[in-house]
Amino acid sequence: MIRFENVSVTYDGSARPSVRGVDFEVPEGELVLLVGPSGVGKSTVLGAVSGLVPHFTGGTLHGRVTVAGRDTRTHKPRELADVVGTVGQDPLSHFVTDTVEDELAYGMESLGLAPAVMRRRVEETLDLLGLAGLRDRPLSTLSGGQQQRVAIGSVLTPHPQVLVLDEPTSALDPAAAEEVLAVLQRLVHDLGTTVLMAEHRLERVIQFADQVVLLPGPGERPLLGTPAEVMAVSPVVPPVVDLGRLAGWSPLPLTVRDARRRAAPLRDRLTDRQPRLDHTARPLQPAPPTPGRRLFKRTKPDTTAASPVAEVRSLAVRRDRVQALRHVDLTVTPGETIALMGRNGAGKSTLLGALVGLVEPSSGSVRTGDAIPHRTRPRDLVRRVGLVPQEPRDLLYADTVAAECVAADDDAGATPGTCRALLSDLLPAVADDTHPRDLSEGQRLTLALAVVLTARPPLLLLDEPTRGLDYAAKARLVTILRGLAAEGHAIIMATHDVELAAELAHRVVLLAEGEVIADGPATDVVVASPSFAPQVAKILAPQHWLTVSQVREALR
Amino acid sequence: MASSPDDGQPRRPSRGQSYRWGGTGGRWASPRSSEAESGGGSWQPPEEHRTPAHQHDRTPLHPGAWWLWSLALGTAATRTTNPLLLALLITVSAYVVATRRPHTPWSRSYGAFVRLALAVLLIRLAFALTLGSPIPGTHVLLALPEVPLPHWAQGIRLGGEVTAEALTFALYDGLRLATLLLCVGAANALASPSRLLKSLPGALYELGVAVVVALTFAPHLIADVQRLRAARRLRGRPDKGVRGLLHVGLPVLEGALERSVALAAAMDARGYGRTAEVPPAVRRTTAALTLGGLLGVCAGTYGLLTAEGGAYGLPVLLAGVAAALAGLWLGGRRTLRTRYRPDRWDMRAWLVAASGAAVAALLALAASRDPAALHPGVVPLVAPTLPLWPAAAVLIGLLPAFLTPGPEAANTRKEPT
């Protein structure tokens, strides 16, 4: 269905080809996964299928790409629109119209389908993706997960033979991601749709793949094979495969079910060992309050926690007639790492916003250290709390890394060179004159982190830090954050990434509909929930192991 | 213009027509549909949304009807300076907006129009106060110190005596302008301009999309500015004031540009600008008709405007318009596009448009019959009175509040189970 014949793509102004020697074929009705570290040209390969590379992006494409028998050299993207449906990383930039229903119809209108056919397909797609209740809603009012589903729905309505998806689940919570993947699975199995998809979060998608194309490095030839074959050599692997490699299982398990069947001997070996929870320093204060103690909280503040870095008391936030948060209580002690989890739209970002004073509480109180965030001058607040937003680029204004660091020193009132020294620690290989835009996703996050840390805030907040990061960048981030926690920084991260939460968090706070529904040690909260449990916990249950590194250390 | 479903497109025969996704919709609509804002509603069978009664009651009015109604009220406002009639016009349009505007982001623009109208009124009064007025008046309210101006600025006066007549005249004038603005605001709130553009003929469709994209650009820009100002706060810089705004200017424009490029790519990949094969003869005819028609329009207009061309002006103009329209119609055959649930021009649309037109026509009639009542005297100063039958005519404009369906309460929330 999709055929790459010795394709290489060179963008204008770059000396080396971004991808080279791409030569594979995707048969009809298969789900093929494109994997590899950041910056190896996954998006380029995907763009070549829809014809956007090179028709839209410019550059030179050698070789030949054919989709359903049509050569992309002679067919422009719009002439492939009836066979290829493309969804990019950011659903918002994909939308042409302004309501859900119109967006679903847009592609069909362009193709000139009969009104009766359009009407039926829109209704079918609304049901298929669970969007029926949102049909008249303006797109800008939807949550991230809803937007992603609308974006996928909007390319499904013309019934394309090929779907091309660039990180379809990276912005979604685990449950929403499963839902989207179930839809894809159904399209492949029932309708014979061919799917080519790039995704960093392999633990979510690997079990659905029929074949995997691995791009090992920039400009290197891709490797094609069954998921098990490719995972055996891949530099990026999900935890289940990592555990399989550690235990020496062959063939490698790809699903939790396969791994559990093999895991009995491993569980036996691990029975008398305990996971070491303290990779990092433990929280300086006694264990965080358990959900049971929260009941009594309103009567008397906890006197044992001498000086919490942040304290939230029965916080409620109402925005645009929507109750974003209600009765949230949270105490953060120094050195503690908290993972804030919950669906898209549960109020995670609002809570973080309230802690840095971006959101004004409608009732209740927020204190960070000795300050009330929304009444404090930004200049004073940065020394108490720092937030790395979902899009780290928002924090960066300057043209070069060096200028950014100088500005950060200035903003924070730190001694000149502080930020640059921090950055050199976190990210040794960045040149001073690099433009922040040219950094990779992970490097940009680290730069933003260094900028925020320049003011030495005791409380550090991160909003979806692992979005778009590959496994290597994520591992670096984990090391950095552990180091910071050991130095006594309290960290709160809002994340959908259960593996990250398992690696880092001492404590997990689960939000739903703006309320705290669980608050306790990571092991208890995460293991108890089927959708938030990391893969290792599922494989080794009922024992409380969360990460491969815990298991690796215990076996040593 | 509308082509058959699979006309000219290779697609698999068994698709779409025979397979029904909706049949098992229940399995796929998950408990998660109670996501985010809604409070625990549960999924409802899709048939709920398909019942004819549901459609009939809820079909929104054709946006063109709302625009005609609003603009007709605006036209009526230009026929009078009677503050009582103008206030009545404002009340009528505001009432309809309050009861009938949908719960959408763009319908909130009415508030902005109200502020704009108020600003216009105040500026008009301030001008009358400081710059003086050609209206001769006898009732001096206060005397401002007059600034002597050089002789080349003759005819301009700064300061000086402020008369009640001049202020009243400015008030009437400003009120008329404000009413006009509020009528445009009402049109905006009741039917977004992008919905109106969807009703353009096929040949102009691509132009329409370009305008729609440009229109959505502004809200995105505002959202970007808010996000980046928030980010400034995170950097420890003041997030308020003009300087804060200036500093985020470049990143905002950068982001907007990137978004436009991404949108263009997405639109291209979704078939924007696909054209049908038309025989060369048709293509040439289209070009000839359009070009000839436009030339005809130019020549005809010239003829009408010059003294000696009066005889041939009108026929040439009409022929030009006809040829241009034919070219437009023929050009529509090149686009494959079909429309999803086009807005229908039904009986209610006729009535709404007619109610607006009636107000405009009756006020125009009144202005010619009884100019004194519609333009209350300023010199000498008299208290305006409400002329009875023009006021009754304005009330016809309230008709849409009773004819059209109300906004859906369930628009932002899910229906209860």
Image (cartoon, coloured by chain):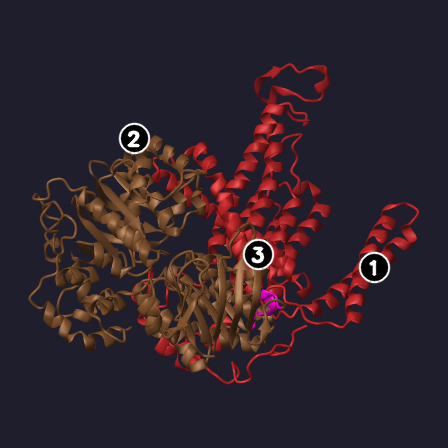
Q: Amino acid at mark 1?
A: Gly
Q: Is residue A81 magenta?
A: yes
Q: Colour of chain B?
A: red
Q: Quadrant of the C terminus of chain A?
A: bottom left
Q: Quadrant of residue A348?
A: bottom left
Q: Position of residue B360 (x, y in %)?
A: 66, 52
Q: Is residue B147 left or right of residue B407?
A: right
Residue A81 position within the rendered picture, expressed as x and y whole percent measured from the top left: 56, 69
Residue type (three-letter) at the residue carrying disc 3: Gly
- Mark 3 lies on residue: A59
Q: Are marks 1 and 3 on the same chain?
A: no
Give the chain letter at badge 1: B
Looking at the rendering, the stretch of residues picked out in magenta corresponds to: A75-82
How many numbered callouts? 3
In the structure shown, which secondary structural element does the residue marked by tag 2 occupy?
A: loop
Q: How many neighbours does mark 2 have within 10 angstroms: few (below 14), some (14-19), or many (20 or more)?
A: some
Whether tag 3 and tag 2 are in contact, CB under 8 A, the answer is no
Mark 2 belongs to which subunit?
A
Measuring 39% from the left and 57% from the top, which residue is drawn there? A38
Residue A414 tag number: 2
